[in-house]
């Protein structure tokens, strides 16, 4: 049986009871797999890694060490929140690594999306290897891989293709939610007692704002993406129900603005809001006009460099959810 293929008989996890059965099964499986060894987990703070962290804390407690890498591509306020929730509230072993300059220096001038993903993925692995080397006896690497990652790991999501670990540091993987779709991961997270704000948080790609600062990343445009994203999350977050994913991308294209009678070059921010069940197909969500104009006005007023706001209406297929 292929361990990366979801059995056709596997029931969709939609209820607390099914989630609890899954949790019990995975706790037993993780205990069996890990024994008394130690696990290192990349804790980005997104739904997937947070659910895996909570599951592993339940299964193996302080045999788990979480590493939160700030690669500079996280959303506004995110590193602080990860520290607050996991270190302060859940009492996890959490190592915080400030790797902002390291990542952004490596990414400077790189505009190919797959190369960007590969650089980010490789730097991640390197950071983990370095952190693991500082710790005694790490033998496993926890991962928040979910089923759509496996289904789509044909090149586009090079970031997910684990296998790039250095030969002298081959960890076995612990991937307790790898056969689950996103909606199931949320049901499991809720059952694990994670706060709603974490369980229902929108998914965020591993390469983070790096794939939303389209083309070669510059620090100024990256800051603009981060600020505009915070505004869009705040405003679209008021919708009921909230869309599955909503964010801003800033293409590497100049946009002419006019201020005090003078023309100047800036950028255009693109708003995207989609609904989906499993991220394999997606449809654009209708955003009320008043909300769009509020977002437009706030972005223009609050985000330096942006002089144009666009709305991406495309469905998947043919457009992928992310811009690159
Ligand atoms: P696309 O853009 O392929 O995205 O329609 C589908 C879902 O996957 C997320 N995504 C990624 N997640 N690493 C990730 O962990 C990546 O490189 C990556 N690219 C896209 C995207 O945000 C959406 O939810």
Image: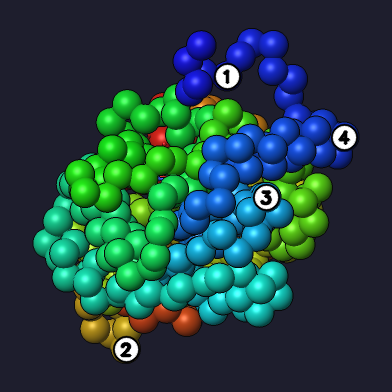
Q: Do the numbered discs 4 and 1 sit on residues whose CB atoms are within 8 Å?
A: no
Q: Do the numbered discs 4 and 3 sit on residues whose CB atoms are within 8 Å?
A: no
Q: Which mark is residue 125?
A: none
- CA–CA distance in space, label 4 to label 3: 18 Å
Disc number lying in front (2 or 1) = 1
The secondary structure type at the circle numbered 4 is helix
> Could you tell me if residue 289 is visible in this image?
no
Residue 69 is left or right of residue 85, and the answer is left
Q: Which residue is mark 3?
A: 59
Counting from the top left corner in percent of width and height, residue 304 is at 36, 81
Q: Which residue is mark 4?
A: 17
> Tag 2: Cα neighbours inside 10 Å, few (<14), some, or many (≥20)?
few
Disc number lying in front (4 or 3) = 3
> Could you say which quadrant of the image residue 322 lies in?
top left
Residue 264 is left or right of residue 316, and the answer is left
Counting from the top left corner in percent of width and height, residue 195 is at 76, 62
Q: Which residue is mark 2?
A: 260
- CA–CA distance in space, label 1 to label 3: 23 Å
- CA–CA distance in space, label 2 to label 3: 62 Å
* Residue found 54% across the figure and 34% down from its top: 178
* Residue found 28% across the figure and 31% down from its top: 155
The secondary structure type at the circle numbered 1 is loop
The secondary structure type at the circle numbered 3 is helix
| First along the sequence among labels 2 and 1 | 1
């Amino acid at each position: 049986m292929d361990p990366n293929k979801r059995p056709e008989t596997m029931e969709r996890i939609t209820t607390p009871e099914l989630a609890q059965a899954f949790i019990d099964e995975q706790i037993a499986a993780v205990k069996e797999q890990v024994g008394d060894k130690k696990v290192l987990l990349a804790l980005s703070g997104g739904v997937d890694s947070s659910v895996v962290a909570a599951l592993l804390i339940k299964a193996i407690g302080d045999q788990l060490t979480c590493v939160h890498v700030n690669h500079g591509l996280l959303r506004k306020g995110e590193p602080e929140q990860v520290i607050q929730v996991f270190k302060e509230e859940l009492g996890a072993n959490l190592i915080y690594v400030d790797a902002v300059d390291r990542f952004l220096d490596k990414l400077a001038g790189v505009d190919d999306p797959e190369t960007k993903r590969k650089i980010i993925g490789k730097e991640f692995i390197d950071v983990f290897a370095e952190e693991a080397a500082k710790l005694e006896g790490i033998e496993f690497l926890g991962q928040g891989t979910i089923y759509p990652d496996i289904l789509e790991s044909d090149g586009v999501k090079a970031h997910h293709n684990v296998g790039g670990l250095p030969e002298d540091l081959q960890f076995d993987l612990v991937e307790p939610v790898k056969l689950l779709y996103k909606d199931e991961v949320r049901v499991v997270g809720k059952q694990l007692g994670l706060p709603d704000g974490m369980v229902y948080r929108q998914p965020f790609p591993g390469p983070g704002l790096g794939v939303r600062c389209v083309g070669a990343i510059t620090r100024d445009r990256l800051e603009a993406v981060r600020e505009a994203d915070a505004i869009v999350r705040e405003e679209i977050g008021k919708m009921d129900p909230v869309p599955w994913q909503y964010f801003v991308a800033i293409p590497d294209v100049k946009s002419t603005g006019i201020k005090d009678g003078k023309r100047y070059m800036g950028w255009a921010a693109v708003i995207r809001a989609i609904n989906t069940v499993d991220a394999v197909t997606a449809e654009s969500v209708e955003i009320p006009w008043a909300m769009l104009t509020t977002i437009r006005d706030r972005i223009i007023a609050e985000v330096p460099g942006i002089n144009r706001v666009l709305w991406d209406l495309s469905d998947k297929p043919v457009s992928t959810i992310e811009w690159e």
